[in-house]
Amino acid sequence: MRWVPRLPDTPPLPVVIWHGLGDSAYAPWLRDLKAELELTYPGMYVHLVALESRSMADRAATFVGDVNAQVARVAEQLAQVPELRHGFDAVGFSQGGQFLRAYVERFHAPVRRLITFGSQHMGITALPGCRDDDRLCEAVMQHIEQATYTDHAQTHMVVAQYFRDTRTPERFEEYVAHSRFLRDINNEGAAKNASYKEGLQRLEQFVMVRFSDDTTVRPPESAWFGAHSVPEAGQPARPVPLRESDVYVHDWLGLAALDKRGALRFHTCDGMHMQLSPACKELVFGQYVGRPRSPGRWLAMNA
């Protein structure tokens, strides 16, 4: 017997979902998740972000493209959806969560809650692995390893655009000099963009989920805005949690202000990167999407 939560008369808030690296808006698991949400919350509108009209092309866009341009395209796409005009919750999986944060910062969309799963908010310091048969992924990662901070990689190789290299002082200097996406959305430059801080502070809640056994996002603390320290000669990098970071201490993005009013939420789901167990879905979707409702269990369609 399937449990369905008792809902108020008002329809649930719409949800926008942006998938991650190597995935597609047309993937069966995402279509199943969309159906699951719609069944659990009758009347909910669920929009899956797609950059291309075909599955393979949409997947390729997660590897190759200009992230700044992609975020702008998605902003245009969402602005044309009538169901989203009065507000929605935004759910991002892996890099899709980071890109949705950039969208919230830059376009001040009517997002109530931003929910990110395993998203590399402070970037990555090691390239993610590829499946054995994924030649596109292997070709892209090989190119990034050789030319992370070239103009071409910073405008065409998606992963390079959120690679924050803290392995040596020299590599970090390259990041500072050439990063065109991550350094901007994290307000790490000398000139701070006050509108980014304003955009994030409009959120009712910013929910960050990390995976307990994540080996794809390195460091895994990046999912909670943790990072490695800025490297110094002869000094190994050390983990810097969010509340000790410059981003938080100087409140470049408004995260400290959000935290002060209890709007930052941190959760851990058991398992590997993007392993969405029923317990994980219950923990996150059961609390943060739709409208306020009676407590109850997340609907497991296949149970």
Image (tube, helix red, strand yellow):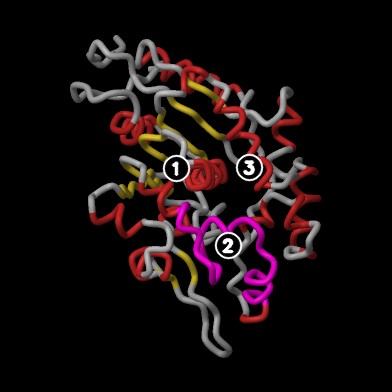
Q: Where is residue 269 drawn, in percent x and y?
A: 38, 43
Position of 21 with respect to 294 (left or right) is right
Marked residue nearer the N-terminal end (3 or 1): 3
Q: What is the quadrant of the C terminus in the image?
A: top left
Q: Which residue is drawn at 74% across and 51% down?
A: 157
Task: Measure the alpha-carbon separation of dots 2 and 3.
Answer: 20 Å
| Magenta region | 171-196
Could you tell me if residue 272 is visible in this image?
Answer: no
Q: In this view, does 228 lie above or below 134?
A: below
- Callout 1 environment at 10 Å: few (<14), some (14 to 19), or many (20+)? many
- Helix, strand or loop at label 1? It is strand
The amino acid sitting under disc 3 is Leu
Residue indicated by mark 2: 183
Per the image, the residue denoted by label 3 is: 21
Q: Residue at x 47, y 15 (%)?
A: 35
Disc marking residue 116: 1
Please identify the quarter of the rendering in which residue 173 is found.
Answer: bottom right
Circle 2 residues within 10 Å: few <14, some 14–19, many ≥20: many
